[in-house]
Image (spheres, rainbow, N blue to C red):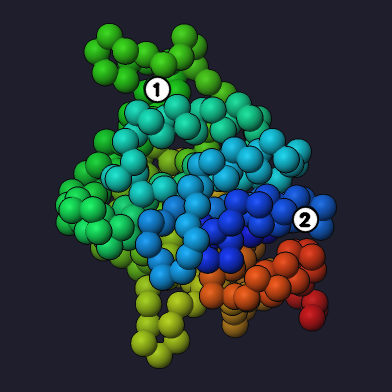
């Protein structure tokens, strides 16, 4: 199991200097990755651009993985994402992961964009295919290439709610999945159970099972980390949403050992 910080790009971690500081501390205390949200509006100020923040993190760290989780590909032009991701992957060789998904409908509606899930889903499917063509050194559109040879492989994780009836969009070109549990009036947001993890893994193509990242929310939940590992989880992402800044720093300083069985 590897452990990642999951930082909202707004509120207490909407300040780029704070995010850089947390990333440096995370590397020093044994965390494996720093992932940053990609939202326009989430009810807290300030808001930062995750791509610029990640570029800064890439130049200020040496070991931790990093990436935007989750990029709403339907509102970010895939030809631009292809270049941004390739540039970040070059800044942090072997450390960059790109997460993609449908995005929050409200982020589209605020700017008069079509938030219909079918429209967003179609753009994600087509967009991930565009990314793969670009990184393979192929033509993005007739007569236009970005690279004269294939780039080193860039991992792509696809996201979506689980359980679900439709497949994860973009999964045909994915290396892993980052599912999000459904909201419950009784329990709010909770991590998927190990059984839900197994069901989700069984529903995605074998090539997309390389990584399974789970959104940890408040803590590890009702199950031990070993149960998640046995189910196939490879990443535990520790959520920083709705936490005071001092608590976010305390979690970082404690290191991922606090999530192991028997830790307090």
At numbered mark 1, what does the secondary structure look like: helix, strand or loop? Answer: helix
Seen as rendered, the residue at the extreme front is 46
In this rendered view, identify the residue nearer to me: 241 or 230: 241
Q: Count neighbours of disc 2 (C-alpha within 10 A) and say few if under 14, some if 14 to 19, many if 20 or more.
A: some
Q: Residue 258, relative to residue 132: is it above or below?
A: below
At numbered mark 2, what does the secondary structure look like: helix, strand or loop? Answer: helix
At x 36%, y 49%, the residue is 72
- What residue is disc 2 on? 25
At x 72%, y 67%, the residue is 249
Lower position in the chain sequence, tag 2 or tag 1:
2
Residue 217 location (% of width, % of height): 55, 72
Residue 148 location (% of width, % of height): 47, 9
Q: Residue 108, relative to residue 90: is it above or below?
A: below
Q: Which dot marks residue 83? A: none
Q: Is residue 186 left or right of residue 31?
A: left
**How many marks overall?**
2
Q: Which dot marks residue 134? A: 1
Q: Quadrant of the N terminus?
A: bottom right
The answer, for residue 200, to whether it is visible in the render is no
Q: Is residue 73 left or right of residue 66?
A: left
Q: Is residue 203 left or right of residue 166?
A: right
The answer, for residue 66, to whether it is visible in the render is yes
Residue 136 location (% of width, % of height): 44, 20
Q: Nearer the viewer, mark 2 or mark 1?
A: 2
């Amino acid at each position: 199991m590897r452990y990642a910080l999951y930082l909202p790009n707004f509120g207490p971690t909407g300040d780029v200097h704070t995010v850089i500081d947390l990333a440096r501390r995370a590397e020093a205390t044994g965390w494996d990755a720093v992932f940053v949200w990609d939202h326009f509006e989430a009810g807290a100020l300030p808001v930062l651009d995750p791509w610029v923040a990640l570029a800064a993190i890439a130049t200020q760290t040496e070991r931790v993985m990093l990436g935007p989780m989750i990029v709403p590909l339907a509102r970010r032009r895939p030809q631009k994402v292809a270049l941004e991701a390739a540039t970040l992957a070059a800044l942090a060789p072997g450390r960059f992961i790109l997460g993609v998904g449908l995005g929050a409908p409200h982020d589209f509606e605020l700017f008069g964009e079509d938030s219909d899930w079918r429209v967003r889903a179609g753009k994600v499917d087509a967009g991930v295919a565009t990314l793969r063509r670009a990184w393979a050194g192929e033509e993005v559109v007739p007569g236009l290439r970005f690279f004269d040879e294939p780039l080193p492989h860039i991992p792509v994780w696809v996201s979506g709610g689980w359980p679900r009836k439709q497949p994860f969009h973009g999964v045909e070109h994915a290396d892993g999945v980052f599912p999000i549990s459904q909201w419950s009036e009784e329990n709010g947001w909770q991590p998927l159970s190990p059984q839900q993890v197994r069901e989700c893994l069984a529903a995605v193509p074998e090539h997309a099972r390389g990584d399974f990242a789970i959104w940890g929310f408040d803590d590890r939940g009702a199950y031990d980390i070993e149960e998640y590992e046995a189910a196939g989880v490879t990443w535990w992402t520790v959520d920083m949403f709705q936490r005071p800044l001092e608590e976010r720093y305390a979690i970082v300083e404690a290191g991922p050992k606090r999530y192991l069985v028997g830790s307090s």
